């Protein structure tokens, strides 16, 4: 995910959250739960009657949200969130946003949101703590560096094993380093992509792993001489997918999944991808 400003976690906290939250493997296929009641504002037991409360991180960045303003409807996840709300019958003014730190949003326990869109990859491990909607985006992980770095020209995963790599804690990006690249040097872990990007700029690491749309944004808009080395193949051959997060066993999960499925079926999700994420997808795949 892009560049939220969260502080670096203490090592002990880091270890615990990584075990709980990181997506260590591709999720098993699971049927989306069926809606158990009326999927409209009169029938949905939201936190506040008649209002759909949507959560996201603080701050949030392009291409997922623009100008750190989830209420704008600009950016892929902001647009998807409002499309889901509309499908459920909530007018724009009936949608409210709350900010929840990334790791806290997928931790066990009651939630302050009805659903949350913050580039959460669906995984069996996370499903132990939260519900996921049907997936709304298939995502790849990518390796980025800067011009002149010795690993900028790597074309295979094997060529990256000697690199000093970094990634954000609790993310599938970090887990991809561990599982797919398995570098000879222990990867550096950062609480945010901001911290990781700074480490790359300062030469403390050779390269970072982030999701592909974020890789395009960082290398084109945030890094001087930023380079996308390549994208990693899907782990176990199964695409990584983003889904909206809901409270565990939420009565809303079935309705939100039905809304996402309908948006996919009528072409809305594809249109929003073209509008907000069209620049992603052209990176070479590391073999």
Image (tube, rainbow, N blue to C red):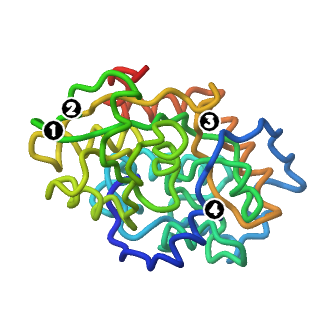
The structure residue drawn at horizontal position 39% and vertical position 49%, both measured from the top left corner, is 64
Closer to the N terminus: mark 4 or mark 2?
4
Residue 18 spot, x, y in % from top left: 56, 63
Residue 137: image quadrant is: top right
Callout 1: 10 Å neighbours few (<14), some, many (20+)?
Answer: few
Q: Which residue is mark 3?
A: 263
Residue 97 spot, x, y in % from top left: 50, 70
Badge 1 element: loop
Report the disc number at residue 115: 4
In this rendering, is residue 270 above or below 122?
A: above
Q: Are marks 4 and 2 in contact (CB under 8 Å)?
A: no
Badge 4 element: strand
Discs 1/4, front: 1
Q: CA distance from mark 4 to mark 2?
A: 39 Å
In this rendering, is residue 230 above or below 186?
A: above
Discs 4/2, front: 2
Discs 4/3, front: 4
Residue 14 appears left or right of 7:
right
Quadrant of image for the C terminus:
top left
Instruction: Give 55 or 222, whichever is nearer the viewer.
Output: 222
Q: Which residue is mark 2?
A: 152
* Residue 276 visible here: no
The structure residue drawn at horizontal position 33% and vertical position 39%, both measured from the top left corner, is 162
Q: Which residue is mark 1?
A: 149
Report the number of discs. Answer: 4
In this rendering, is residue 282 above or below 254?
A: above
Residue 199 spot, x, y in % from top left: 22, 59
């Amino acid at each position: 995910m892009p560049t939220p400003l969260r502080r670096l976690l203490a090592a002990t906290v880091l270890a615990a959250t990584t075990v709980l939250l990181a997506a260590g493997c591709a999720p098993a296929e699971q049927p989306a739960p069926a809606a158990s009641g009326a999927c409209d504002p009169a029938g949905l037991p939201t936190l506040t009657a008649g209002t759909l409360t949507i959560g996201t991180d603080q701050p949030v960045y392009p291409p997922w949200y623009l100008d750190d303003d989830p209420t704008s409807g600009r950016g892929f996840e902001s647009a998807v969130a409002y499309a889901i709300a509309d499908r459920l019958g909530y007018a724009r003014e009936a949608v409210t946003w709350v900010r929840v730190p990334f790791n806290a949003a997928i931790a066990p326990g009651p939630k302050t949101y009805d659903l949350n869109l913050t580039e959460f990859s669906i995984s069996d491990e996370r499903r132990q703590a939260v519900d996921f909607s049907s997936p709304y985006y298939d995502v790849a992980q990518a390796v980025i560096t800067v011009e002149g770095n010795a690993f900028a020209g790597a074309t295979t995963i094997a060529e990256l094993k000697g690199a000093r790599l970094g990634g954000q804690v609790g993310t599938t990006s970090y887990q991809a380093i561990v599982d797919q690249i398995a570098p000879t040097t222990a990867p550096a872990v950062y609480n945010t992509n901001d911290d990781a990007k700074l480490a790359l700029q300062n030469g403390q690491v050779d390269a970072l792993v982030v999701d592909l749309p974020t890789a395009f944004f960082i290398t084109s808009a945030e890094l001087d001489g930023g380079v996308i080395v390549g994208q990693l193949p899907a782990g176990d051959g199964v695409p990584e997918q983003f889904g909206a997060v809901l409270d565990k066993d939420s009565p809303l999960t079935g309705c939100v999944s039905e809304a996402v499925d309908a948006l996919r079926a009528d072409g809305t999700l594809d249109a929003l991808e073209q509008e907000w994420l069209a620049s992603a997808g052209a990176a070479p795949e590391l073999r």
